[in-house]
Image (spheres, helix red, strand yellow):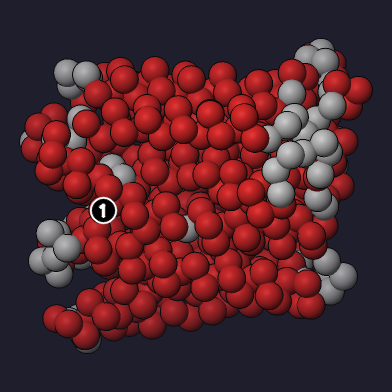
Amino acid sequence: MIGSRASQTEFVALVAMLFATIAISIDAMLPALPEIAATLSPEAPNAAQLVVTSFVLGMGIGTLFTGPLSDAFGRKRVILVGSGLYALAALACAFAPNLEILLAARLLQGLAAAAPRTVAIAMVRDLYSGREMARIMSFVMMIFTIVPAVAPLMGQGIIALGGWRAIFLAYIVFAGLTMLWLGLRQPETLPPDRRRPLRPGDLWRGTRAVFTHRIILVSILLQTLTLAALFATLSSLQGIFERQFDRAATFPLWFALIAVASMTGSLLNSRIVMTLGMRRVVTRTYAGVAVLTLVALATLGTGLVSGNLGFAMQMLWAIGLFAMMGLTMGNLNALAMEPVGHIAGLAASVISSLATVGSVILAIPIGLAFDGTATPLLIGVAVLVGLNLILSLKTLAEPQS
């Protein structure tokens, strides 16, 4: 680690907390969706889901810029400025008088949140590469998973104390804590002699260089489909628990169980990626989740199982889907970043931006198709994961990575 005062363990925890800016910004909102719908869009309750996807869309757009900025000005400075803008946007969300302004403020908040999320990946690439980077990312994802486990519970508690608008004040506190930790404990990972000035010609050449690597194109497509399945699930899951299973009050507890159980994906990846390789882990994961989704669709979607047994099937499927993230995303990022370490910030921006924006475009219609049951979600995810499996089988067959 370049001049770092922090141990590897602390570095992993810090990167996980920077990643968690995204998780807490999405998952803490899930218990608030019914109240937001009742307050701001009673005539179109499904529109409240856009509070999630507007944030993700903003993050995807912002991601395109934060990487090149971090290549030019350093990782820490960009993260700190982005976190400050994130806090200001959260303040605007807290006082939004209608859904339109709330969505606009969430879009801005997502733009700012792109800094800690994207630049954190570049920080890891500054210090690690290949399977070692994949291993570090697995540890990051393990710690990161704790936040989705507690975020809905935190959101529910804040709503009980101060209403759904108070959640945005908690975001301000969270941003302040991460800025303080980064500022005091983690030295800059990109020294001045390795920085790349912001010249349009250089950015264009760097972007073109990113697209000359087949593995990066494959990774972008796989990440797009994977994230689309995740965001569609996050948009619909609270409604499924409420309307199909009548468990709205206990949703945060069940979501915490899903998040904790899905940590096994990251833990398993950290154990097997060094021996099996990233490509095999990704392909086998998609195969397993595709089978699980078809089983869930054949049982839940047809009404073959219902009640407690149906709820158990829903939980098992959700755990498998969330575990898929820990078994694929870190590996896909490591595969994509391996050939472009010299332009890590720009590459991370282009990859993450395209994957995130593309995933939102795919996830929104699946979320809006929600009809009170899990069937639209399961059909959508079956298509997405099926495409992932076909693509990975055709493109990730090489055993060397």
Kind of residue at disc 1: Leu
In the structure shown, which secondary structural element does the residue marked by tag 1 occupy? helix
Q: Is residue 242 above or below residue 178?
A: below
Q: Which x, y percent locates residue 186?
A: 68, 35
Q: Which x, y percent locates residue 194?
A: 88, 27
Q: Residue at x 67, y 69 (%)?
A: 270
Counting other residues with Cα less than 10 Å from the Cα at mark 1, is it few (<14), some (14-19), or many (20 or more)? many
For residue 105, which quarter of the picture? Answer: top left
Q: Which x, y percent locates residue 346?
A: 74, 31
**According to the image, label 1 marks what residue?**
153
Q: Is residue 133 above or below residue 77?
A: below
Q: Is residue 278 above or below residue 175?
A: below
- Residue 59 in view: no
For residue 93, which quarter of the picture? Answer: top left
Q: Which x, y percent locates residue 272?
A: 70, 76
Which residue, as the protein is rendered here, is positioned at the far right?
A: 193
The reply, left or right, for residue 183 in relation to residue 252 is: right
Q: Residue at x 24, y 24 (%)?
A: 94
For residue 307, which quarter of the picture? Answer: bottom left
Picture quarter with the C terminus: bottom right
Q: Residue at x 86, y 47 (%)?
A: 339
Q: How many marks can you see?
A: 1
The reply, left or right, for residue 46 in relation to residue 325 is: left
Picture quarter with the N terminus: top right
